[in-house]
Image (tube, helix red, strand yellow):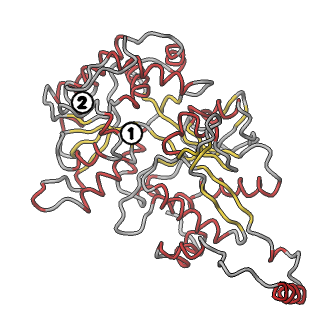
Amino acid sequence: MPTLATGPVELARQRGGDRKRLADKLSPYVILPPPTAAAVRQVAVVLSVLGCLGAAACQQPAALRVALYPYVPDSRGLFQELEAAFEASHPGVNLELVETSRDPISGELTPLSRSYYSGGLLSAEADVYEIDSVLLADMVDAGKLTALGSVTDRFIKGALAASTVDGSIWAIPHWVCGNFLYYEADDHAIREAATWEALLEVLGDDTGGLLIDLSTATLGEWYVTALAAGGAGREEILRDLTTATLDEGAVSLLAETLDSCPAGSCRSDAYHGRVGYYARRFARREARAYVGYSEMSHFALTEIAAECGPADACLSAESIAVRALPPASGGAAAVGWVDGLAVAADLPRERQRLAREFISFLTSWDGYRLVLDPEWPAAPRYLLPAVRFSSDELAAMGPLYPAFFGAYQERIFLTGDGIDDELRAKGQLLDCALPSEPGDEPAPDCS
């Protein structure tokens, strides 16, 4: 693993190991009674004597507004760490997190954590945007971004192509994500299951066998995941998304998967809203296996470390294993997603320079190390860098990283105009096709 001298991470930790110190720089102004005219004249004289008036030292800090992807573990704490490090290496710069967007019709401010995919990101005003690749073409079409020119491809295969629209690169890949199968390391039957059908056979009709989030909000993603598992390629999936019908094989695969779920769990919108809920239940051995993103392991490990007692029979951190989801047919690929960093259109030259430097920092070893190597006793966030690092480098951030990247393999990345809307439309159809949880009312859009 590379060793670093006093870089921005070290500077940040030296100046603020205790996060409470960050509050010291959040209020740079002191509220005083209105000054008298004499006081104003005295201040002006002092400043002129010091030669400060009009000098760079007397100017307001240069602000850089960034809208980061909101759905990561401890998103605000993550930003504060990045903020401290970047500002330490860029004196006079004030990094500002954009957490809301204004509804273009009502004018109301809405948290990006609620509206990111429903127009919030398109309405947000920032200098740097972190964009899920399913929204990238829409951001380009809206004129929100600046093309980045030539970029060296040092990323996971396909990630840079997923950040390209009409032949131009519009975002620098930051994170990749996709679903993984979690299980207990000594469960050889799950580890060796070669197909999705074989996995379901191993789990049987055990309603405590599998935890998987098939709530309404996830169904568009799960539909294309099932299509890919059945052997569909990228172009075939994109064509299917433009139709108003569902693939019977994909629906059947997901319906059969529900048979291994704990009753009342896997189709629950309420549980979907409890971030990390399924991972925590898996940590408590409430299911034999769990399907989720890599960062969900953060919540499982936090549960084990902070909440599990000797009488709880929880998994140990060392006993958690991960693998790729098995295909439903031979040669099938899995679906992946890319979050990329983009520069806003029409920025002044100096702010555009700062924006590019911030993106370079986030996608450097130093920037990733800050995010992925938390201070004890926090669990690793287990986000997956889009940049290719060695297994040894990533293992230093958390012992599961080599397994995650070994399981990530080559993924199908879906991009294009209106992809997010098409995924939502398929999700609504699938919501009606899959059985609802006992006691739940059918989806309102089902005829």
Mark 2 crowd level (few <14, some 14–19, many ≥20, 10 Å Cα): some
Where 399 sits versus 152, above or below? below
Q: Secondary structure at mark 1?
A: helix
Q: Nearer the viewer, residue 79 or 316?
A: 79
Q: Residue at x 48, y 61 (%)?
A: 77
Q: Residue at x 64, y 44 (%)?
A: 124
Precedes in sequence: disc 1 or disc 2:
2
Residue 36 image label: none
Q: Residue at x 35, y 38 (%)?
A: 180
Q: Position of residue 19 (x, y in %)?
A: 48, 72
The residue under label 2 is 193
Q: Which of the 4 image quarters holds residue 42? A: bottom right
Given the current orientation, which residue lies at the most extreme left position? 311
Q: Amino acid at mark 1?
A: Ala
Q: Amino acid at mark 2?
A: Ala
Q: Residue at x 73, y 58 (%)?
A: 354
Name the image quarter holding the C terminus. top left
Where 15 sits versus 222, above or below? below
Q: Is residue 223 left or right of residue 122?
A: left
The residue under label 1 is 407
CA separation, marks 1 and 2? 14 Å
Q: Which of the 4 image quarters holds residue 246? A: top left
How many numbered marks are there?
2
Q: Position of residue 195 (x, y in %)?
A: 28, 25
